[in-house]
Image (cartoon, rainbow, N blue to C red):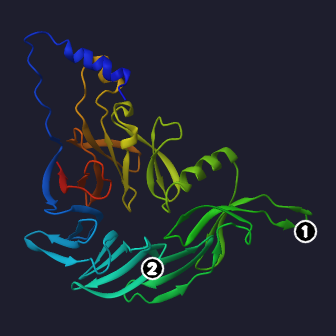
Amino acid sequence: MVTRHCIVLAVALISLPVGAQPAKPPPSLVGATEVQSFGAPIGFVDDAIAFDDQRLAYVVADGSTKTELHIAQPNTPEVVTDLSPVTLHPIALKLLGARTFVVGLDANNDQIGAMLDKGKVAWKVGPATHITVITREGAQRIAIDRVTGTRHEVELDSLDSGKRVAAGHAFESDGKALDFHLNHWSDGWTKAYGIKGGEWDRKENQRTADVEATYDLVTGKFSDRHPIEDLFEQRKRFQVLADANGSLDFVRLSWDNTGIVAWRAGKSAPIELDQALAHYDPKSLQGDIEPDGTVWIALKVDPVNPDAVARKKADPEYLDIFKAGADGKAVRKMRVLATGVRHRFGVIHDKVWLLERSNGFDRGGKALTFYSIN
């Protein structure tokens, strides 16, 4: 669709004075240095990416018959393992010393997990609806969630052996049995959040007010009950959390789309950019929250934003990367020229990585590139 801004800008560009020299092209990279790039001679670099202190794990796939796990580290040849006996569509990786835990989809689109040890499958878990590595009571566990209709059945497995260490309690998400209206999940679908119906108070001879509550499917108990003090705020907050796909830590636009909000442990805090938010395409927003609460944000410049139209000059189509600390002030750290290009973004040990998407295909991308911020 051709917008009024595009028409105004196009007319302005056509109207350049005769003999005027075109402006110098903008720099392709600002504020950072390219460290390393990984490509796929055949197929694409898939979305599953992991790291530890020394190594990077990524996947090369063709979407039909080939899936390879690549583990790279400085000054060492890459270690390549065939993943096709496990899955043709890995969705998550975790490096664990000499071993790698892989979660992927099977032919039925269910999730399966496998531990690779020296390139061979040591054990498998699943299939299940969700398989997630979580930390519970200080230990890493594999959360297994199987869904049949409205019924959820969960268990916790050892990340060392794949054996069950805890069996959960069956949970009906329709809420009838527990008088509980489910809204969202966390911890690998082992914790459910919602509204718990009030209980009968014999002394007052009336039902108490409904409360926010958390139901732990492993222990089968409710916890963290809180009164609903502001119904409007609670509904808005629950609407955002319901769309977060099982996470409590993410970045979103504010409810009125005029600002950016970081959500940590299900609680929101505004983020203040050191650039005008109106210069960016709001649909391009991506966020990454580190364990210490540091927030990284990626936004792509809208070349025909209102200020560019007013200047009668299109802005370069940069992807800008911001970093925000506990004070909520986000400072632009780097920018990559991304004319006509889409990226998936993330951060590993203060290094930014970008996965260049292929046109018309949202799985994986052409190349995975790492940048060190200057």
Against 116, residue 261 (above or below) is: above
Q: Quadrant of residue 163?
A: bottom left
User: What x and y, as percent, mark residue 160?
Assistant: 36, 87
Instruction: Identify the residue position indicated by label 2 in the image.
Output: 127
Asked whether the residues under the numbered discs 2 and 1 touch, taking CB atoms below 8 Å apart as contact, a structural biologist would say: no
Residue for point 34% across, 36% down: 274
Above or below for 64 versus 305: below
Residue at 13% x, 62% y: name it: 41
Is 287 placed left or right of 245 in the picture? left
Q: Nearer the viewer, residue 358 or 13?
A: 358
Q: Please, what is the three-letter code of the amino acid marked with disc 1?
A: Arg
Give residue 323's position: percent from left, percent from top.
Answer: 32, 48
Residue 48 locus on image (x, y percent): 30, 65
Residue 213 x, y percent position in the rendering: 66, 64
Asked which quadrant contains residue 172, the reply is bottom right
Mark identifier at residue 202: 1
Q: Mark 2 belongs to which amino acid?
A: Pro
Sequence order check: which comes first, mark 2 or mark 1? 2
Position of 18 with respect to 85 (left or right) is left
Considering only vertical position in the picture, is 102 above or below 200?
A: below
Q: Quadrant of the N terminus?
A: top left
Q: Could you give the CA–CA distance between mark 2 and mark 1, rounded to whole angstroms?
A: 47 Å
Q: How many marks?
A: 2
Question: How packed is label 1: few (under 14 Cα within 10 Å), some, or many (20 or more)?
Answer: few
Crowd around label 2: few <14 · some 14–19 · many ≥20 (10 Å): some
Q: Residue at x 16, y 62 (%)?
A: 40
Q: Which of marks 2 and 1 is in front?
A: 2
Picture layout, residue 205 above or below residue 240: below
Q: Is mark 1 on a helix, strand or loop?
A: loop
